[in-house]
Image (cartoon, rainbow, N blue to C red):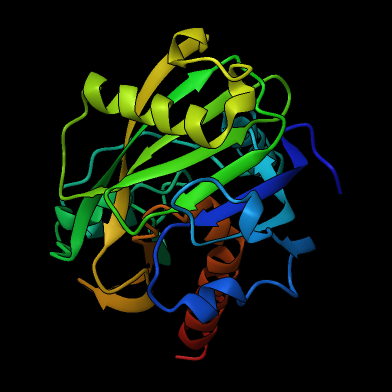
Amino acid sequence: MRHPFSRLIELAVYDRTKADALARAVPWFKDIVLNYRPIAKDQLPPDVESGHIFTSVCINTAIYLPWLVSQCLKAGVVFMRRIFAHISDAENAHHSGKKAELIVNCTGLSAGKLGGVEDKNMIPARGQTVLVRNDSGFMCGIDDDQEDLSYVMQRAAGGGTLLGGCYQKGNWDPQVDLNLANRIMKRAVDVCPALTGGKGIEHLDIIRHGVGLRPLRLGGTRLEKEKIAGVWVVHNYGHGGYGYQSSYGCSQAAVKLVDETLSLRAHL
């Protein structure tokens, strides 16, 4: 099913690292993605060890997130804003006025401070991007195994082209770093000259700069159930920079935990 917030587009993935070259040259996903093909060595950008091209999906999050809200409303979900000092406080926040039978904890970075959870493994992984009007014609990314990342993502429905980025663990700074922004734009133009017709970053038409704090959990996503202060809680947080990609699978696993817990409760 096609949606206006997403598009199929060709994605080129480059790898500068030399470690485990065979595994990277023949990636695990080659038989899963559409139209996969390796990039010949003589067609790779400078200092790149290997590369792949395949058809992938890019979503325009500015449209996708409101669409998700609309689907929830359609299903009868009631949205409320509340401030909780302890996760068990949510038990008394159900819109019906009755106590909740179960709480699903999707609090992201707040799971590190929320009473009853206080997960010390939660840290931010700061990201920074530049959104431009320029058309790249395709998407690309470079795996550097470094804090500085390189990716160019062309969003659907006139959403512009997103240039990134970085993955700065433990950095809480919400302000734009203009020096980093210049490096991001320089790397993007180097790997994708079509952005400016082979010209410099001064030919990028900037819409805005962005900074976000990814909810990274050391040790991986937490997806499990536990009883806190007498109420069952299903945890689903700590997805780092892959929240959109893993959302469907993680939500299905969370629903399974909810069903198992409520079924067990019904038989007590």
* 101 versus 108 height, above or below: below
* 49 versus 61 height, above or below: below
Question: x, y (%) of residue 37?
Answer: 75, 63
Does 123 sit left or right of 239 as displayed? left
Question: x, y (%) of residue 4?
Answer: 78, 32
Q: Residue furthest front?
A: 42
Q: Residue at x 27, y 63 (%)?
A: 217
For the C terminus, the quadrant is: bottom left
Quick check: can you spot residue 153?
yes
Question: x, y (%) of residue 128?
Answer: 34, 32
Question: x, y (%) of residue 226?
Answer: 31, 78
Q: Nearer the viewer, residue 163 or 240?
A: 163
* 67 versus 208 height, above or below: below
Q: Nearer the viewer, residue 124 or 96?
A: 124
Q: Residue at x 38, y 38 (%)?
A: 165
Does 146 sit left or right of 77 as displayed? left
Q: Residue at x 52, y 9 (%)?
A: 205
Does 17 sit left or right of 76 as displayed? left
Q: Residue at x 85, y 43 (%)?
A: 2
Q: Residue furthest right?
A: 1
How many numbered marks are there? 0
Quick check: can you spot residue 129?
no
Q: Nearer the viewer, residue 138 or 62?
A: 138
* 187 versus 241 height, above or below: above
* Residue 77 occupies quadrant: top right
